[in-house]
Amino acid sequence: MSTPNPRRQLRPTDVKRLNRTWRRATGSRLALILESVTGPFNVGSVFRTAAAFGVETIWLAGNATPPTNPKAQKTALGTDRLVEWHEPVPAVEAVRAAKEEGYRVVAVELTGDAAPLHEASLGGDVCLVVGSEDHGCSPALLEASDAVVYIPQVGRVGSLNVSVAAAIAVAEARRQEWTATAVHS
């Protein structure tokens, strides 16, 4: 009797079973604040990542582009209906709303007191914040946040695309949770 090739791509039923295993190991809530992220393709990409990692809520802040924008829809592929989101408000209002919902707010930005992402404690209910493509997080938002982290980089480029930075931060928050509970498929 031969054993199936473990390197074959999973069938849809197998993928659903695998995802269900990870969902059971996920107890913490994740949220995002997008401050003045105006690029619709970036917004759509963030929503798609958020839906994949179980982000519950996205607050739009400043002049952030809503996911209903036709260009955002092209990248989001309908995932904006899987994540609760709020129309843009001033950044400090978005932080206040996240805190009122029980989230610890952690901005992803290069500041003098920022901790490396992999060393930061992202356990529990966390709302991660990413700022605009050009200027990052505003001073008022940084002041209102509970902590600031940065993504270490060793290449010759000093910054990442905002949707990529959001994906790295969300994945790290989940990785920390899953490592703490020692989940393995």
Image (spheres, rainbow, N blue to C red):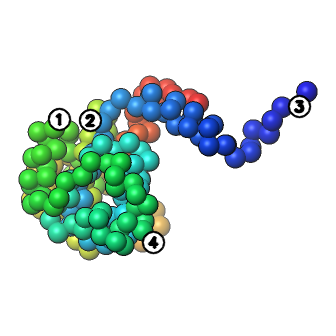
Instruction: Give the side of residue 181 with respect to residue 7, left or right.
Output: left
- Label 4 belongs to which residue? 156
Residue 37 in sight here: no
Task: Identify the disc placed on residue 38.
Answer: none
Instruction: Give the side of residue 67 with respect to residue 77, left or right.
Output: left
Q: Earlier in the sequence, mark 1 or mark 4?
A: 1
Q: Residue at x 10, y 50 (%)?
A: 144
Which SS class for mark 4?
loop
Q: Quadrant of residue 152?
A: bottom left
Which SS class for mark 3?
loop
* CA–CA distance in space, label 1 to label 3: 52 Å
Residue 170's place in the image compared with 47, above or below, is above
Q: Earlier in the sequence, mark 1 or mark 2?
A: 1
Tell us which disc is closer to us: 3 or 4.
3
Tell us which disc is closer to us: 1 or 4.
1
Q: Nearer the viewer, residue 138 or 114?
A: 138
Q: Earlier in the sequence, mark 3 or mark 4?
A: 3
Q: Earlier in the sequence, mark 2 or mark 4?
A: 2
Residue 53, position in %: x, y?
41, 44
Q: Amino acid at mark 1?
A: Gly
- Label 3 belongs to which residue? 2
Q: Earlier in the sequence, mark 3 or mark 2?
A: 3
- Label 2 belongs to which residue? 125
- Label 1 belongs to which residue? 102
Q: Residue at x 19, y 54 (%)?
A: 86
Q: Amino acid at mark 4?
A: Arg
Q: Nearer the viewer, residue 104 or 139?
A: 104
